[in-house]
Image: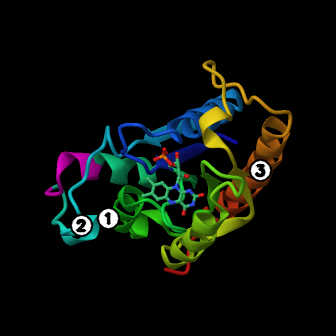
Amino acid sequence: MNLTITLFYGSVRSERQGIKAARYLENQLKERNIQVHFIDPREYPLPLLDKMYKEYEAGKAPATMEKIAGFLKASDGILIVTGEYNHSIPPALKNLLDHFQQEYFFKPSAIASYSAGHFGGVRAAVHLRVIVGELGMPAISSMLPLPGIGKLFDENLKPTNKYTHPSTQKFLDEFIWYIEAFKTQRSKGTPY
Ligand SMILES: Cc1cc2nc3c(=O)[nH]c(=O)nc-3n(C[C@H](O)[C@H](O)[C@H](O)COP(=O)(O)O)c2cc1C
């Protein structure tokens, strides 16, 4: 099945570390011949939320918002790579997520989290699970916590431990199973 995934990465810090996890996951998806729309809020800057995409007349939304909406509409699933800021998700990620709504409906999401410490951002991931539920893109059961993000990948984006790669493959296998199931069911129509 031809699949397309939007990947949201949520940090705009100049010293950001999570970009390595996000690029690693993008590479893993591409190795599976999945088309990836990689949304980095630095490359796709949106203002702090004023109007949601749906509040603009057709064709009147700012170009960046229109582009992201197009990517989401064309996607079968959304992979979110979140850091942990004070036990929740980064503000740029929340801002990005809040701009859209219908574009997510009836598509599964998957949450990969990371942090500098040992817990791999799980507290942010748990918050994010509630948010994506409200947004109509329920998260798959498994999450992918990535601890010690500063040293987790080498300069070629290869994991520096033996656990990350197999955990990632298991996580992506599960995500793709859900994506295919939802896509098959979406093709028969949706309740709204
Ligand atoms: C504002 C802020 C709050 C943070 N809060 C947490 C936290 O609650 N738990 C944690 O494990 N790490 C926390 N950290 C450390 C981050 O895990 C670490 O800096 C990580 O690299 C941030 O992601 P980024 O580099 O992609 O922006 C925090 C970092 C920042 C900048």
Say which residue appears at 69% left-offset and 27% top-offset: 31
| Magenta range | 60-66
Q: Which mark is residue 99?
A: 1
Tag 1, which secondary structure?
A: loop
Is 135 in the magenta?
no
Q: Where is residue 26 in the image (x, y as percent from the top left)?
A: 59, 35
Callout 1, which amino acid? His
Say which residue appears at 40% left-offset and 42% top-offset: 40
Tags 2 and 1 touching, CB below 8 Å? yes
Could you tell whether 32 is left or right of 129 in the image?
right
Q: Judge by depth and name the residue closer to the eye, 187 or 91.
A: 91
Q: Where is residue 146 in the image (x, y as percent from the top left)?
A: 69, 48
Number of residues whose C-alpha sits closer than 10 Å to that of mark 1, classed few (under 14), some (14–19) or many (20 or more): many
Q: Examine the rendered structure and indicate whether residue 147 appears above or below residue 151.
A: below
Which residue does the numbered mark 3 point to in the structure image? 171
The color scheme shown is rainbow
Which residue does the numbered mark 2 point to in the structure image? 49
Tag 2, which secondary structure?
A: loop
Q: Judge by depth and name the residue closer to the eye, 95 or 64.
A: 95
Number of residues whose C-alpha sits closer than 10 Å to that of mark 3, classed few (under 14), some (14–19) or many (20 or more): some
Q: Which mark is residue 162?
A: none
- Which mark sits nearer the N-terminus, 2 or 1? 2
Q: Judge by depth and name the residue closer to the eye, 111 or 101.
A: 111
Callout 2, which amino acid? Leu
Farthest residue, direction front: 117
Is 64 in the magenta?
yes
Please say whether residue 182 is visible from this viewpoint. yes
Cα distance between the residues tagged 3 and 2 = 32 Å
Cα distance between the residues tagged 2 and 1 = 7 Å
